Image: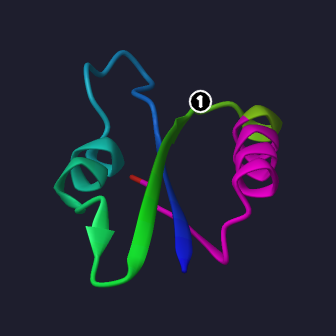
């Protein structure tokens, strides 16, 4: 099984985003589950498009999106 976990890049003048920090704490593999990680831009339609393209390209079974706000 493969899961794509997304987090957002920093915005509003911040140097980091708490969702990025959380993503860093997640292991790349948990038992037989491969975790694919992706930082997406904090731009309304752009982030969703990039996440969708990666999910489709990599054939993941699920997507989990982390956010700060």
Quadrant holding the C terminus: bottom left
Quadrant holding the N terminus: bottom right
- Can you say whether 2 is above or below 22 in the image? below
Between 9 and 32, the one lying in front of the other is: 32
Q: Which residues are magenta?
A: 47-67
* Residue positioned 28% across, 77% down in the render: 30
User: Which residue appears farthest toward the front when viewing the image?
Assistant: 32
Taking the image as shown, residue 20 lies to the left or right of residue 47, namely: left
* Residue positioned 59% across, 33% down in the render: 42
* Residue positioned 43% across, 68% down in the render: 34
Residue denoted by label 1: 41
- Can you say whether 61 is above or below 22 in the image? below
* 1 falls in the magenta region: no
Element type where label 1 sits in the image: loop
Taking the image as shown, residue 35 lies to the left or right of residue 29, namely: right
* Numbered circles on residues, count: 1
Taking the image as shown, residue 31 lies to the left or right of residue 42, namely: left
**Residue 44's spot in the image, x, y percent?**
75, 38
User: Which residue appears farthest toward the left when viewing the image?
Assistant: 25
**Residue 33's spot in the image, x, y percent?**
41, 78
**Residue 13's spot in the image, x, y percent?**
36, 15
* 61 falls in the magenta region: yes
């Amino acid at each position: 099984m493969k899961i794509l976990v997304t987090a957002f890049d920093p915005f509003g003048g911040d140097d980091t985003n708490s969702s990025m920090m959380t993503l860093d704490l997640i292991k790349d593999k948990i038992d037989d589950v491969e975790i694919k990680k992706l930082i997406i831009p904090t731009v309304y339609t752009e982030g969703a498009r990039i996440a969708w393209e990666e999910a489709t390209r990599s054939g993941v079974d699920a997507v989990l999106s982390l956010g700060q706000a």
